[in-house]
Image: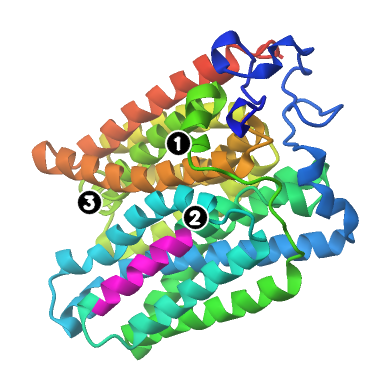
Amino acid sequence: MTAAAAPGSPVPSPESGSSSASAPPPAAGSIPGRPGAGPGRVTAPASATAPASATAPWKGWAAVCAVALGIFCLITSELLPVGLLTPVGADLGVSDGTAGLMVTVPGLVAGFCAPLVTVGAGRLDRRLVLCVLIALTAAANLAAAVAPGFAVVLAARLLVGVGVGGFWAIAGGLAVRLVPEHHVGRATALVFGGVPTASVLGVPAGTLLGELGGWRTAFAAVGALGLVTLTALVLLLPPLPPSRHIAFPELPALLRENRAVRAGVVVTFLVVTGQFAAYTFVRPILQDVSGIDAGFVSTLLLGYGVAGVAGNFLAGARDAYRTLLVISVALALILALIAVLPGPVAGTTLLLAWGLAYGGVSVSVQGWMIKAAPAATEAATSLMVAMFNLAIAAGALFGGLAVDGISAPAAPLGGAALMLLSAVTVWVTAIRRRPDHLG
């Protein structure tokens, strides 16, 4: 039986492809693979969590912190050019649009590399793989810092995409192997806390460094952070031999045979596409619709990021299915309102609520994948990460077409429509079919 056939759909059914149909059904909301799992808790097979029981608790949490630092470093690396497009373009003689490829290219590469790295890692120790990926990212940033031309910078950004996609796909499901099962939700939230924290701290700090010492200094600093992260991973991560070897054909098989994984990938696409269709154009929306002065937008976006960090930790220990339903409905309402309600007070309030709601997305979709395929967490995570990164590019494209073809408010309204589709998908595939959905 392949990993794709492992139990893990929210509710086993004949079409799910699971061979567990003849086995007694799990407790409502529980996850197959560990007896006595409680409702909504993220668990995994005993083999996957063995390292957590074999080490002191503080060592497990130290390892989680090292992985979180890795996520922070990688997302900062991916988004760093956002605040440096103009100085990079001016120094290297390219337009702002061409310089924007420094953001687009890593996202697309990360989307394709997430499953490829997961399969290519084969029987290698995951500790070694993570160290190699973070070292690659550090080297890429240092290479960009001394690049003689834009072509070299873009080549370095390709390597950043490989690091982001591969590291995220493998690291996303490691919490179940580092801490006891009753702490998995919090540990996963800590790991994914690196995503919004990079937006709140990493990117603004990199932009400030670029303003003070030039864009090359900013890239060099992130490269140095990568070396610090590499040291932390080497010292704090325990050996993490693969729980099983993943063959490439198992990835499409997992989508085909496991309804829960398939639904999770669809929900990821809808939520992330809707988010970036709107968020890519948040500045003109705040200025044109809410009437907020351009000088205050940066401060408000910082508040958005802080709210996102809070949302990440609020969502981390909760049931992934229910949380994504709430997030989807909340974002649909928020995006619809911010597109039509005038006034700085309304715009500010809605922006902070937006950050709080979206902050829980990354950790919740990861929790969905852990619950959907507890025996194939890496494979399921790689599919989610691939779709997540591709959806970022799709959202920006969709939003741009809406803004150019209609108006700025059309972008958040389109995003709201996708959020509603996400809510319906979560309800139909994960909530309505569960016997405890009224509990």
Of callouts 3 and 2, the N-terminal one: 2
The stretch of residues the image draws in magenta is 152-164
Identify the mark at residue 268; answer none if there is no mark: 1
Q: Is residue 131 visible?
A: yes
Question: Neighbour class for label 2 at 10 Å: few (<14), some, many (≥20)?
Answer: many
Task: Give the answer, above or below, for where 255 lies relative to 360.
Answer: above
Looking at the rendered structure, the secondary structure element under dot 3 is: helix
- Could one spot residue 334 in this view of the protein? no
Q: Main secondary structure of the magenta part?
A: helix
Spot occupied by residue 154 in the image (x, y as percentages of width and height): 27, 71
For label 3, the residue is 284
Q: Quadrant of the N terminus?
A: top right
**In whole angstroms, how far apart are the C-alphas of marks 1 and 2?**
20 Å
> Which amino acid, mark 2?
Val
Q: Earlier in the sequence, mark 3 or mark 1?
A: 1
Rendering coords of residue 199 (x, y %): 46, 61
Front label number (3 vs 2): 2
Looking at the image, what colour scheme do you see? rainbow
**Residue name at image x 55 percent, y 61 percent:** 71
CB under 8 Å between discs 1 and 2? no
Disc 2, SS: helix
Which residue matches tag 2? 117
